[in-house]
Amino acid sequence: MIDHFTDGLWTPVIAYAVSVIGSFIGLMLSVRARRTTGRFARWQWLILSAICLGGTAVWSMHFIAMMGFQVSGTAIRYDTGLTLTSGVIAVLVMGVALYLTIRRATTAWLLAGGAIAGSGIVAMHYLGMASMNLNGELHHDPLYVVAASVIALAAATVALWFARRVDGLPAITIASLLMGVAVSCMHYTGMFGMSATVEDHGHVMAVPDGATSSELLLPLVVGLFVFLLVCSLFLMLGVEDTPRRASAPAERISEDPGERGNGNGEYSPRHGFDSFRSTGR
């Protein structure tokens, strides 16, 4: 017998809250990536956004929800390598999708990015399922697999549309709440399509190989929360480099008759080092 809520509603509620927080900070970072004009700064915001969206909003939600998962008659352990690989996949596909969507702002690239991110989320989910070791076998209903995949593709596309379009605190908050719902629906749709066959050897079964959820998942989730705090500091302390703000000084410079140009449209200060050297002072 499979129980998805061994701890009651605590695990789905906490998982949803983590997904919303990760989505909120990830979308805030994507806004910075859209607005910034520097190449290095743009990559910085994109990478941070991909980690928040893929690593926290999707991967952390998945494995926090898994802490409430139990199969009667057997202990469950997690393969560390496969678990970490599933998280890396979620971050990488989200990073690629964000880049394609933000830098190539067309509907075709939005759909392509949604397909890439959605496929990556599905791969992350079922690779996470494959990382579970138990005394028996898990089976997946194909109908639920298809339904979970459709939800993942739709949710990823909507998330990327939000990343490209939404602006302002109210809109980002609403988008984050909706993304949390979409990610949770995808996860539990896939989970409800699972069944398990437990081996009965007629005696006490050995504990499967791997780490427990508390040994493996809690440190990773705590680490991601620390990362979210760092990203929040970046958002609070960072200076937005928007095209509007970047162009404002240039406009003031060109309109100020007391300042000179160098003939190439660049600002040349009246009392710069070159003028000091030319006067011999």
Image: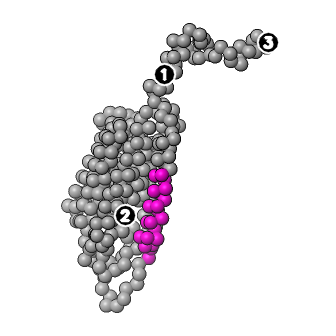
From the viewer's side, name the closer residue of 213 and 169.
169
Assign the magenta stretch its main secondary structure.
helix
Kind of residue at disc 1: Ala
The residue at which mark 3 appears reads as: 280
Q: Where residue 281 sits in the image (x, y, percent)?
A: 79, 14
Q: Earlier in the sequence, mark 1 or mark 2?
A: 2
- Residue 248's disc is 1
Query: Which residue is denoted by mark 2 in the rendering?
Result: 64
Q: Is residue 49 left or right of residue 177?
A: right
Report x, y in % for residue 259. 59, 12
Q: Nearer the viewer, residue 206 or 220?
A: 220
User: Can see residue 72?
Assistant: yes
Residue at coordinates 76% horizontally, 15% vertically from top-left?
A: 277
Q: Residue 152: give x, y in percent of width and height.
A: 29, 52
Point 50% across, 44% down: residue: 234
Magenta region: which residues? 209-229
Name the side, left or right, on which 100 lies relative to 38. Answer: left
Question: How far apart are labels 1 and 2 at the CA level?
Answer: 47 Å
Q: Secondary structure at mark 1?
A: helix
Give the residue displayed 48% in from the left and 22% down from the top: 247
Could you say whether the residue bearing mark 2 is in a helix, strand or loop? helix
Whichever of callouts 1 and 3 sits on the residue coming sooner in the sequence is 1
Q: How is this picture coloured?
A: one colour
